[in-house]
Amino acid sequence: MARAGRYLVGPFISWRFKGNYANFAAHDKIRERLRQGLGSIHPLSVPVRSIERTYVDRDGLVWLLVESTAYDLVKHFRGNPKLWRRLTCLWSIICRSCGHNPSTTLRPISSVCNVCGGSTAPVVFWRDAYSREVRVGPCNVVDGLLECSGTIYYTGEILRLFRDLAGNIYADVLSFTGSKQSDEMRLVEVDELPNIVWSRPVMLA
């Protein structure tokens, strides 16, 4: 029986969650390598339970640290990236009405299903074991993403959004740093904000 090893694989531009597996689409920069090594280009399909950590590199692409016995497959996805930060979770955008599951990226996508017109929600299917829920703010919206103290928070990492009496934005997020702030501050929870596509995630992990 093949022994399991730990491998850093990527870069990936998008992914899709189905059952107990997630399929990750490779970036164009390694497509030729995959074509030569595998004879064709297919997403890397991994069991969700095999994912140990996830990262974003300096180009905004996703990398995975996985445990796998399939060395002959994962060796074609191995690399040595300049990692930017660790992700706290992975999520998939799923329609609440018809279940349509388009490819998910780090960039926000429409909150309206392009199949049936129903509303969509991020479904968190993997969470880093060391992540924790903290409150951050005041926050800004930068290019459609939530930013606080220099850190960008992606769709699935944002659990709840709030405004204070002055209109400042606060958020409960998944993070590796910080601590839960006091609830004494008078905040009003909101379902949406201008210039950001977001809805409260469904937590499976």
Image (spheres, helix red, strand yellow):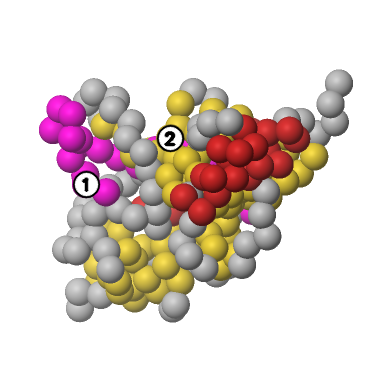
Say which residue appears at 46% left-offset and 50% top-offset.
28
- Dot 1 alpha-carbon crowd within 10 angstroms: few under 14, some 14 to 19, many 20 or more: few
Q: Is residue 174 above or below residue 59?
A: above
The question of residue 65 being in magenta is answered with: no
Q: Is residue 122 magenta?
A: yes
- Counting residues from the start of the chain, the first of labels 2 and 1 encountered is 2
Determine whether 19 is above or below 32 in the image. Answer: above
Q: Residue at x 37, y 71 (%)?
A: 147
Give the percent coordinates (x, y) of residue 144.
27, 64
Q: Position of residue 136 (x, y in %)?
A: 42, 69
Residue 181 in the image, given as x and y percentages of width and height? 46, 68
| Callout 1: SS | loop
User: Is residue 184 visible in the rendered structure shown here?
Assistant: no
**Residue 79 sits in quarter:** bottom right
**Residue contact at pointers 2 and 1, CB within 8 angstroms:** no
- Please report the residue visible at 43 percent of the width from the left and 45 percent of the height from the top: 14
Magenta range is 109-130
Q: Can the viewer see residue 23 in this picture?
A: yes
Residue at which label 1 appears: 110
- Local packing at callout 2 (Cα closer than 10 Å; few below 14, some 14-19, many 20+) is many
Q: Which residue is mark 2?
A: 16
